[in-house]
Image (spheres, grey):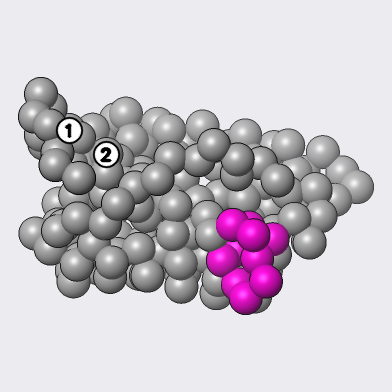
Amino acid sequence: MSGAGAAVIEPFDASSLRVAVVAASWHTVVMDGLIAGAQRALADHQVVDVTLVRVPGAFELPVAAGALAGRGYSAVVALGVVIRGGTPHFEYVCRAATDGLGRVALDHHIPVGFGLLTCDTEQQALDRAGLPGSVEDKGYEAAAAALATVWAIRHAGEVRAR
């Protein structure tokens, strides 16, 4: 499984942060798991000001994330899933969504949690969705990474006690 060596982010008090979660609507079961994982991470970090915005698919994640990034959020968490099919559509959507989310982060100087699953099979997506029986929880990881990045930027040069 690709999650080997993932960073361990211990929960900390992020209650002062405003976070937007942008989630695609395709693949309901996987998306429900990703959203639940992100919500668990935000709760573990004591974030109470959370806005959830749903968009049709992964291709729409960057434009929604960009609009929200300009509205005073501390971080945006982008969640979606693209499963490979028999056409080049997979590559185009994955590239556009990935590049677009990176651009949002750089253009707005805001952490964007990257919770976009790009999988060859539906089983790979289910394995990463944070569902009962999943081996990874990418929604949780994306939200925790965004929060840790906000903390790192705001506390550059300080050492966080563990």
Q: Which amino acid does label 2 sit on?
A: Thr
Q: For mark 2, what is the residue?
A: 149
Q: On screen, 158 above or below 162?
A: above
**Left or right of residue 123: residue 77:** left
Q: What residue type is labelled 1?
A: Ile
Q: For mark 1, what is the residue?
A: 153
**Left or right of residue 11: residue 7:** right
Neighbour class for label 1 at 10 Å: few (<14), some, many (≥20)? few
| Residue under the image location 81 percent in, 55 percent down | 121
Q: Look at the numbered discs 1 and 2 and tell me whether their residues touch, using CB distance below 8 Å.
A: yes
Per the model, the C-alpha gap separating discs 1 and 2 is: 6 Å
| Residue under the image location 20 percent in, 45 percent down | 162
What span is in magenta? 127-136
Neighbour class for label 2 at 10 Å: few (<14), some, many (≥20)? some
Asked if residue 80 can be seen in this view, the reply is no
Picture quadrant of residue 50:
bottom left
Q: Position of residue 111 (x, y in %)?
A: 29, 40
The outermost residue toward the top is 157
Answer whether residue 133 is magenta in the image: yes
Q: Where is residue 128 in the image (x, y as percent from the top left)?
A: 63, 58
Closest to the observer: 20 or 121?
121
SS type, badge 1: helix
Which secondary structure type mostly characterizes the magenta part of the structure? loop
SS type, badge 2: helix
